[in-house]
């Protein structure tokens, strides 16, 4: 059997049709269906044809195509794989385009492109004032690498040309795409670009929006999966370690507290105040698979979870359900940030306790 035939038979679209999941809405690389697990009346389950994955916004069920088939049929993934390969694929759907194959670059390549990209951008005065209002100093702003997204199309195309002149290939870089005249461009949303880092590499860019997006969302990914030659970003989490002490903290056998923060810009802010702790930034929606990266931090004493307003209103149950699969409930303490850039008073007190401990040590 040819590779393309295997991909079609194990695709999320074929699985949807084999399970007779009712389609409620679709657009380009995304299909919404009624969830077969929580039986929601609305189309709460999102099928991502780029990642071949599923996520239910209502009950939190998530995974990939073969697992979806296996779970519905009450069989193993291995048996599901065998059964799917036995029948021809049914790829009928209401998508506006055909299945999109992700060509996303690896993290090292993305870091090189995003570093060069940010160097070519400026930070608008109003965004500087906003960041200062949040509690960042000019030194913090420059060190982290916040930048404004240019809204002028000619300027965006010019920046892309400069990147290409620097021998950087934009193919497979989330956020970049080709326009109708086949010129490289990038997504334009009014807001601040926030680098999401892993091991000091920029693996993605988060956008802190000037104006709220759908469902009161204040932050979205810099992504271009629904554009020509575009690419989708992963819902990566971000680790911020104590300065120059990441190796010591990772190998330290003593019990340690960690702080998990919903949204990257708030994570950077909290890291300024808790610079002797590990701070983990998570996006609005984060998968159980991505959160498994937390397992690399050993000897965790207590987990402090700081939720921004959007997560409190929309995704708190899903985030907590995944965290409780990693940590016992008794180890998890919740804190709520209900204003942009606000550090909750409960965790400020925690910081004071750390400072007292350090001075007495």
Image (cartoon, rainbow, N blue to C red):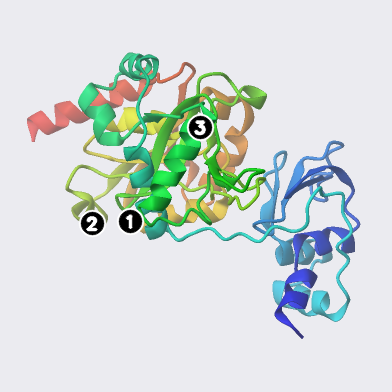
Mark 1 or mark 3, whichever is nearer to me: 3
Q: Are marks 2 and 1 in contact (CB under 8 Å)?
A: yes
- Within 10 Å of disc 3 (Cα), the crowding (few <14, some 14-19, many 20+) is few
Quarter holding the N terminus is: bottom right
| Residue that badge 3 annotates | 154
Task: Reply above or below: 295 against 38.
Answer: below
- Residue sitting at 73 percent across and 75 percent down? 4
| Residue that badge 1 annotates | 298
28, 12: nearer the viewer? 28
Q: Provide residue 131's location: percent of width, then percent of height.
A: 35, 20
Tell me, yes or no, if residue 72 can be seen here: yes
225, 289: nearer the viewer? 225
- Image-based side of 279 in relation to 332, left or right: left
How far apart are the alpha carbons under marks 2 and 3? 54 Å
First in sequence: mark 1 vs mark 3: 3
- Residue sitting at 48 percent across and 48 percent down? 236
First in sequence: mark 2 vs mark 3: 3
**Picture quadrant of residue 241:** top left
Q: Provide residue 74's location: percent of width, then percent of height.
A: 80, 66
190, 207: nearer the viewer? 190
| Residue that badge 2 annotates | 253
Tell me, yes or no, if residue 334 can be seen here: no
How far apart are the alpha carbons under marks 1 and 3? 49 Å
Q: Provide residue 322's location: percent of width, then percent of height.
A: 56, 47
């Amino acid at each position: 059997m040819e590779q393309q035939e295997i991909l079609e038979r194990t695709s999320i679209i074929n699985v949807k049709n084999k399970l007779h999941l009712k389609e409620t809405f679709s657009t380009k690389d995304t299909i919404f269906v009624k969830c077969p697990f929580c039986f929601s009346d609305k189309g709460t389950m999102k099928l991502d044809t780029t990642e071949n994955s599923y996520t239910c916004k209502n009950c939190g069920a998530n995974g990939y195509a073969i697992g979806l088939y296996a779970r519905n049929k009450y069989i193993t993934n291995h048996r599901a794989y065998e059964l799917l390969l036995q029948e021809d694929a049914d790829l009928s759907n209401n998508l506006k385009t055909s299945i999109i194959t992700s060509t996303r670059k690896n993290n090292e390549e993305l870091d090189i492109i995003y570093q060069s990209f940010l160097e070519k951008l400026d930070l608008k005065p109003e965004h500087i004032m906003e960041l200062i209002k949040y509690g960042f100093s000019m030194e913090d702003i420059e060190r982290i690498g916040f930048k404004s997204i240019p809204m002028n199309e000619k300027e965006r195309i010019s920046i892309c040309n400069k990147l290409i002149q620097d021998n950087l290939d934009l193919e497979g870089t989330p956020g970049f795409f080709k326009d109708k005249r086949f010129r490289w461009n990038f997504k334009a949303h009014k807001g601040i670009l926030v680098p999401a880092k892993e091991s000091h590499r920029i693996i993605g860019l988060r956008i802190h929006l000037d104006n709220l997006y759908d469902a009161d969302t204040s932050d979205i990914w810099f992504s271009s999966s629904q554009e020509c030659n575009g690419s989708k970003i992963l819902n990566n989490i971000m680790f911020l370690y104590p300065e120059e002490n990441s190796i010591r903290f990772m190998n330290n056998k003593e019990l340690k507290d960690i702080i998990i923060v919903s949204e990257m810009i708030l994570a950077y802010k909290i890291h300024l105040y808790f610079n002797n702790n590990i701070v983990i930034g998570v996006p609005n929606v984060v998968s159980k698979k991505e959160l498994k990266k937390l397992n690399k931090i050993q000897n965790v004493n207590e987990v402090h979870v700081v939720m921004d307003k959007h997560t409190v209103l929309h995704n708190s149950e899903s985030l907590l359900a995944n965290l409780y699969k990693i940590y016992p409930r008794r180890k998890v303490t919740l804190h709520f940030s209900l204003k942009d850039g606000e550090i909750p008073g409960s965790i400020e007190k925690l910081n004071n306790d750390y400072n007292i401990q350090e001075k007495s040590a």
